[in-house]
Image: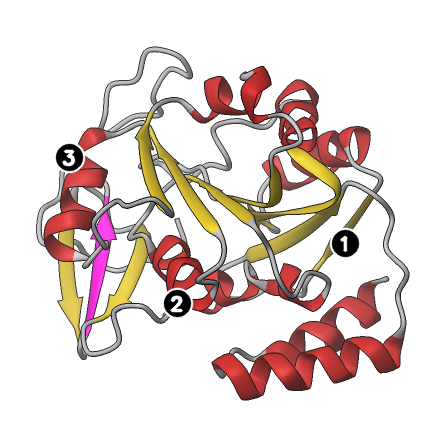
Amino acid sequence: MLIKRKSIELAESSRRPARKPKFAPVTLSEQDGVRYLHFGTEWVQGAMRIRKPDWPELEYAQQMMAWMLFIDAPRAIAQLGLGTAALTKFCYRQFPEATVTAVELNESVIAICNSMFKLPPQDERLQVLEMDALDFVEDPDNHGAFDVLQCDLYDATARGPVLDTPEFYQACANCLNEHGIMTVNLFGDHPSFAKNLKAMKFAFGHVMCLPEVHDGNVVALCFKTRPTIDKEQLAARAAEIVAQTKLPAKSWVKGLLSTD
């Protein structure tokens, strides 16, 4: 999904049907102290530095936290697509006052996150749901419930998000409160990019993209309500994020201002 690296196991896989999935095998590889997750191909679905299990190792995963420039004290965060639980773990540790919900359809991904990627046990703040992300966002009980959604929905073939319609993104927007933000991992050099961007702009009040990283990853920020962009305030907030978390927030500001 992100960068190509040979998996421990290689198996043929095909793009799963949207509603009745047939999953590719979950496989692992390791190199230079980093453990990678694959779905039976060389495409990386997530990564964890073994000595820093709560740190989002990949740059695109760090950029998925760029909503922090606008929201400093979230109360409810959700991830659509668990991957290696990088975002789930980081949000759970970084925001002790927030609830964190992860939605993952593949039970094998949940199991391997528990056994190999140090996903914390579920408690009153952390919930991991084995279900379809579309069902989750369409559930009226989730509407208006979240400050933040983080969407990273890819299958083994890495052809683009498996959910990408205007209706899906409208349902995501419905799950956010008035000033909520959604971040989405896209492929900037793939035909799916334009389709997803158009669908997001249909559903959200404002959409911005960070500059491309890795092998084409582009993180989009989707705002329920169009934000006020104040360069000085963003710079000050970025400095706070760097000091508190070591995330490269100053580069996010530079990237957003260059594309706004």
Q: Is residue 104 found inside the magenta-colored segment of the image? A: no
**Could one spot residue 29 in this view of the protein?**
yes
Magenta span main SS:
strand
What is the C-alpha distance between the residues marked 1 and 2? 21 Å
Residue marked by disc 2 = 56
Q: What span is in magenta?
A: 34-38
- The quarter of the picture where the C terminus appears is bottom right
Label 3 secondary element:
loop
| Nearest to viewer (mark 2 / mark 3) | 2
Circle 2 crowding by C-alpha within 10 Å: few under 14, some 14–19, many from 20:
many
What residue appears at the point 44 percent right and 59 percent down from the top-left corner? 91
Label 1 secondary element:
strand
Circle 1 crowding by C-alpha within 10 Å: few under 14, some 14–19, many from 20:
some
57 with respect to 9 (left or right): right
Residue 220 - label: none
Q: Is residue 37 found inside the magenta-colored segment of the image? A: yes
Residue 8 at x, y = what percent? Answer: 9, 54
173 with respect to 75 (left or right): right
Residue 25 - label: 3
Circle 3 crowding by C-alpha within 10 Å: few under 14, some 14–19, many from 20:
some
39 with respect to 210 (left or right): left
Residue marked by disc 1 = 208
Question: Which is more toward the observer, 53 or 29?
Answer: 53
| Nearest to viewer (mark 1 / mark 2) | 2
Amino acid residing under circle 1: Met
What residue appears at the point 46 percent right and 47 percent down from the top-left corner? 99
For residue 64, which quarter of the picture? bottom right
For residue 238, which quarter of the picture? bottom right
